[in-house]
Amino acid sequence: MFCQICNRQLAPVEPIYRLQLGASTNVGRRASLCKSCLDHFGPTRLYQISPFREQHCEHCGRPVLTPSRWKQKRASCSAKCRGALETKRAKQLRAWRRSEQECWHCRKKFAPKRIDQRYCSLACKQAAYRCRMCVSAN
């Protein structure tokens, strides 16, 4: 992890400060700063910032300090950590979708081989199709 102002490599346990500094720094997006850069830029802008709230990055555990007015449920210290968290959540969602489901025709529990599988077997799938055709014909 690097400070986006001084480009200094930060230690794994060193806290990172996430701030929105304006268009001149990081194209107006939130920037990650070290404590020394915060102290350097602080006297001009720190009076506008509400007190900091400390959270820990869900991926690497680094302390992340953000203004308390930001309503963040999850903290990430960098884009790399945020990407790793999104990948982990996507894997969990896919695993949940593939968990044991109920067949739409016979109501038996089965483990689907695909995310969109609705029937436990081809026989149930065909029987459900015949039921739908019989209903639509009447």
Image (tube, helix red, strand yellow):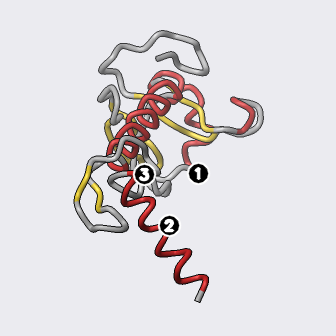
Q: Quadrant of residue 133?
A: bottom right
Circle 3 crowding by C-alpha within 10 Å: few under 14, some 14–19, many from 20: some
Q: Is residue 136 above or below residue 50?
A: below
Q: Nearer the viewer, residue 60 or 109?
A: 109
Residue 117 numbered mark, or none: 3
Residue 13, label in figure: none
Look at label 2 and name its amino acid: Tyr
Amino acid, disc 3: Gln
Q: Amino acid at mark 1?
A: Gln
Seen in the picture, residue 32 relative to 71 is either above or below; the reply is above
User: Is 55 positioned to the left or the right of 24 in the image?
Assistant: left
Q: From the viewer's side, name the closer residue of 10 and 40.
A: 10
Residue named by callout 2: 129
Q: Is residue 20 left or right of residue 67?
A: right
- Nearer the observer: mark 1 or 3; the answer is 3
Q: Position of residue 56 (x, y in %)?
A: 32, 37
Q: CA distance from mark 2 to mark 1?
A: 64 Å
Packing grade of label 1 (10 A; few <14, some 14-19, many >=20) is few
Give whichever of 49, 70 is nearer the camera: 70
Residue at image position (51%, 10%) is: 8
Closer to viewer: mark 2 or mark 1: 2
What residue is shown with label 1? 48
Earlier in the chain: of badge 2 and badge 3, it is: 3
